[in-house]
Amino acid sequence: MAEERRQKQCSVSLPTESMKAMAESVGVGQLQEESCAALSEEVSYRIKEIAQDALKFMRHGKRRKLTTNDIDNALKLKNVEPLYGFQSQEFIPFRFASGGGRELYFYEEKEVDLSDIINTPLPRVPLDVSLKAHWLSIEGVQPSIPENPPPAPKEQQKVESTEPLKVVKPGQEEEGTIQGKSQGATPADGKGKDKGLIRLKPRSTHELSVEQQLYYKEITEACVGSCEAKRAEALQSIATDPGLYQMLPRFSTFISEGVRVNVVQNNLALLIYLMRMVKALMDNPTLYLEKYLHELIPAVVTCIVSKQLCLRPDVDNHWALRDFAARLMAQSCKTFSTTTNNIQSRITKTFTKSWLDDKTQWTTRYGCIAGLAELGPDVIKTLILPRLTVEGARIKAVMEGPVVSNIDKIGADHVQSLLLKHCASVIAKIRPQPDNMEQYRTDYGYLGPMLCSHVMKARTQAALQAQQVNRTTLTITQPRPTLTVSQSGLSGSAGSRTPSIIKVPSSLTLMTPRPGTPSQPSPPATKYIVMATSAGASSTQQVITLSSSQSASPVTSTVPSATSTLQPLVKLESGSGPGLTSSRPMQKYIVVSLPSSASSSLETKSSVLPTSISTTPLEAAMKLDRSESPGASTQSPH
Amino acid sequence: THDLILHGSCFPFLNLAHAHFIFKMAAVQGGLADTNEEKDIKTEPSSDGFGNNNANDGRVLSTSPGSSASAGINKSATGAPEDQQTLLAVLQFLRKNKLTESVEILRREAGLPEDSPELKGSDSSGAGSGGAAGSGDKEGGDASSLLSRVTISSSAVAQTSSVTAAGEDQPDVNVVLSAYNQQGDPPLYQVYYSGLKKFIESVLDCHRAELSQLFYPLFVHMYLELVYNNHESEAKAFFEKFSGDQECYYEDDLRVLSSLSKREHMRGNETLMDFRTSKFVLRISRDSYQLLKRHLQERQNNQIWNIIQEHLYIDIFDGMPRSKGQIDAMSGSLAGEGKREANKAKVYYGLLKEPEIELPLDDEDEEAENEEGKPKKKKPKKDSMGSKSKKQDPNAPSQTRIPLPELKDSDKLDKIMYMKEATKRIRLGPDNLPSICFYSFLNAYQGLTAVDFTDDSSLIAGGFADSTVRVWSVTPKKLRKVKSAADLNLIDKESDDVLERIMDEKTASESKILYGHSGPVYGISFSPDRNYLLSSSEDGTVRLWSLQTFTCLVGYKGHNYPVWDTHFSPHGYYFVSGGHDRVARLWATDHYQPLRMFSGHLADVTCTRFHPNSNYVATGSSDRTIRLWDVLNGNCVRIFTGHKGPIHALAFSPNGKFLASGATDGRVLLWDIGHGLMIGELKGHTDTIYSLRFSRDGEILASGSMDNTVRLWDAMKAFDDLETDDFTAATGHVHLQDNSQELLLGTYMSKSTPVIHLHFTRRNLLLATGAYNP
């Protein structure tokens, strides 16, 4: 009972260097090492003592967080003058600095110009304390009003779905049904309560109040309607609203039915909307979807592997939907797969089975591979890599053989780039250098040489990143994720370019391995290391891959600076945006190379080209958290 | 005697107790075992010759002459000269510190001659001769060693007391600690400890649990001994090796211990002082004890035996050894379990007789408002009144046991209101749960720290961390101040509505703020008549506020440290407060000094409650014990141990028989006051319980916690299931069933609002409060 929780309690004390630094700061020059050690022990002890007293004040203050006031009060107990004026906006006010082989943290104290303070407008007067009464419970039943928390918290939903027989809704059941819980007690209990043995599944009501019905109607209409702004709002609501538990079964049915109908009708846009709803539901921190997976998973899988998802398979970008759905699938595997439901292994089996089938169409093939690849490098290693040779031969047959149909060719092309994209990084990790074209060809067949260049690229990138650690770090806030669907009329990305969100062809954006839309409406500023490149002709990075619609094989080398099709666009925003918390003035570089003409598209690892750029159905906000954009190289590929 | 150690006392006789105590310690250390103290344990060993054994070992191992002498002296010396000697030493000490008054008192009480010699020299000769008379061959060494100690310690005391002249007067650390001075072989400590561990693990199951109780106190004392003797690295190794074996509920204390690694740190460390000054109490069956003794004897495990004798109090009982569960239920406090005798005193837990109130007014009212209901209502009321007045509860204290204030007319009126409301009260039960109304404090940035309701639920008071106290009216009736003196002069004093006229309409508002404290307000309590409000604060004062003028009337100063809680007596006039100085004080509103000081807790007194009959006060403490004090004589009549964390909530059942307590460990424990037993454990909360309240008829217990929930428990069932046979009552061994889930009637989550106060209205509606904390 005691062992597991006990960490090392002994001997945590301040480093002697701190003692030195503090001594220096008060003008004591050379402090003996011994005195430092003695001091640090004494100081550590006193600090612990004070912290323990401060804890008392926290408890009596009915708080969970220790505040500086508690420390002050504890100091007062010891007859020590409290620290006056310790005020900080930030949680940890220390700054880190290193240099000369020393690492130290310091407390940044800026000189403040008094006139600035005087001239700043007064902040709003905080509201006065007030009392508000509401019913927490009426004769034992908690009314669902906004003042009360949502009826079923996520943990409870989880317990309910995993152990449905043990659970009783608190405060709403009669005494008798509660007995089930005390089963764990020793049988020597000797009470022999018979009714305790009967485990009843709690009845759950699925009646929706009028408001809920209205809400449901509004939300579903907005989600599949034509107004994108409304849809964004609706999805936001699904992703964040804490009270949707009651409506979850309806949403789940709505999605599964919707997919069923729209697949038949090949309505790509609606399928995308529905998948985004799934995503939003998954992102909602208060919902636990386990109970509804039997409806959601088939819908998602349909969107991954269906033979046809759109009316014009040669034109519409249904690949993006497949990618997106595959990522959703991977996410739900990660979240919900347990030893009892075996979601991941069952899904893997399904994908593998249809992939192995010779008659499978290229679209389905693509879906299967995408679905497997998203499950992680281990799955790629064990299931995809061994099949590369076979798959390569199949692709070769289509690409170089007699022209069968354009659709097949596009399909094969997509499968090829998908394989290259996912396999390269895995191979780069497991295969020792050097990368030999011929060796690759013997190992992987037709795809070998291309793989080889991709792997080399991945390695250089990793290396590049390694040496970059010491460079300037820059912060780029993650833009709000949007996966917008523009109907085929709205072609080209050039028109809707805004300074804040750069829209690029979808194939570029959807490459993040997770369905990477953060669930929080305002995510904390995430820090990414981005290499700043100078604008101009010399911005030739090895990462950049140029491809034109004619060339099937991607060129993996430096972009000749003379290429007129590329005009690197460097955006420089100085000052800190609203999302940036650091007080240092910061520069934000977003380096993007944009196609100068509609005929060329730009990609990093793989070049998947929409055959006709005029219909780019999917656009999304680009995220710079991966090494997707040329010139912006980031962390090593996973 | 330990209970007498007071900190921050200002009375000479307490100082005397102090000094006496210190010397006693010195005496024990120097080889003069105090007979009173040691009797309990000493009887056993001397009967089977263990004393001899001890002496032999002492000769072999000891380095100081004092310890080797101990056995010899102990046997040969009779009580009287020893006492004489000690007294003389005390006198000398007092004189040295110029405490002439105390000298006088002590001399008078001890019946010593006035003309006792002036100075040290003659004193020492007197002491020496006393020693010689008693102890035969070793007299010289003994006397001188005692004296040298006396002088050393007294000079030390003189030093420290001059330093802390203004502050509190703690027992001198040096002297207290010097008991750790015995030198064992430091590297062997691990061997000793693991030897004992091995032994205890190998004994029969039935004894193992009991003997396992020894681990923790032994561990602590051995560690402290190592630290005291500057074996830092050995201490650290010892701690690392064995701290993992201790029960998890001692974690907090272990953390304190672990930070303590140098002898200098021991000075002024309260936890350590607690360990040293109070013996750790263990209850062990005779069989198990014999087993242990035999083992230690065989192994010649002197070190451990010394610790057991000096620092532990082993409460031996006859009968079956207790099970692990039984022990775990009762252990966890800072100083072990309460002794059995501690809970034997008679407690008059019954309620006082309700005063006879004539109800003509009431009847008239009812006739006016409801003619049908009259006959029905009248009867039960008469009955209840009749039964109360006729039979005097044998467990109730006599009406005049403590003087209570006379009932005023307004009080009688209120009583009548109360009875009228009571007839409309909902009968609660498992099938009839109360409704809960939650009062959220919004925008309480400054931190809500305490809340109280008036009994009639018309006012709420909140104490805040920014030192303010705010009072709200939750009825449409607004809060008004009394007019100024000049305006009051103009009022027609003969008019019927004079009470109405004295109020200043212009000041009417829903809430009032009371300024006066200079630190966070941690405790708050309304007087039963709703005229006063008490608040206790970090600034060390308790303040009495008038709810007529909304001004501060009195600041009660006595606690020098934060006052954690205060509570008005249900009959008014008296109140109790408790704080960081480990003392609970009983006050009367018209005295600026406390009437009683309840001292005995080993750590902060964190919460205080009055018994419904005002004759007793319950206090909960950070030392994880609950004590019940008799207001009449200030005695501690109950010690309840079993909580594993500081206690933050207490509630008496309306019939006065039971006590419920809640702590940071998230458990509610139920206690039978009459028998002094733990009778129930309610598990379910996941964080500190800040509030407990019984429904008006005692059927339901509500608990509010930091985990944002209000939980309702079936109190009737918890108390009904109780079978208190004579055996259990006699031994104090409880068998607790784990039936929390059956007793839990409901859990109600609030929206990120910790529940810090609960209150049942007179009609059994539950009110809960907390600060919304998004």
Image: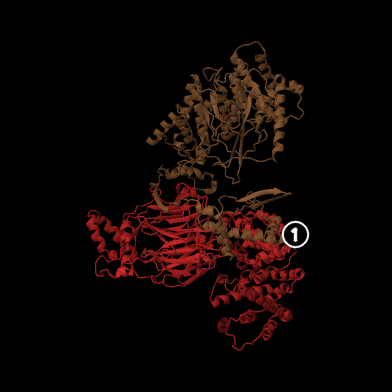
- Decide: few, some or many residues near mark 1? Use Cα within 10 Å; few <14, some 14-19, many ≥20: few
- Image spot of residue B390 (x, y percent): 33, 66
The answer for which chain carries disc 1 is A
Q: How many marks?
A: 1
- Image spot of residue B711 (x, y percent): 45, 50
Amino acid bearing label 1: Glu
Residue B642: tell me if it is visible: no
In the image, is A32 to the left or to the right of B625?
right
> In the rendered image, which quarter contains the N terminus of chain B?
bottom right
Towards the viewer: B162 or B102: B162
Q: Which chain is brown?
A: A
Q: For mark 1, what is the residue?
A: A33
Q: Which color has been applied to chain B in this rendered view?
A: red
- Image spot of residue B32 (x, y percent): 67, 75
Towards the viewer: A158 or B342: A158
Residue A241: tell me if it is visible: yes
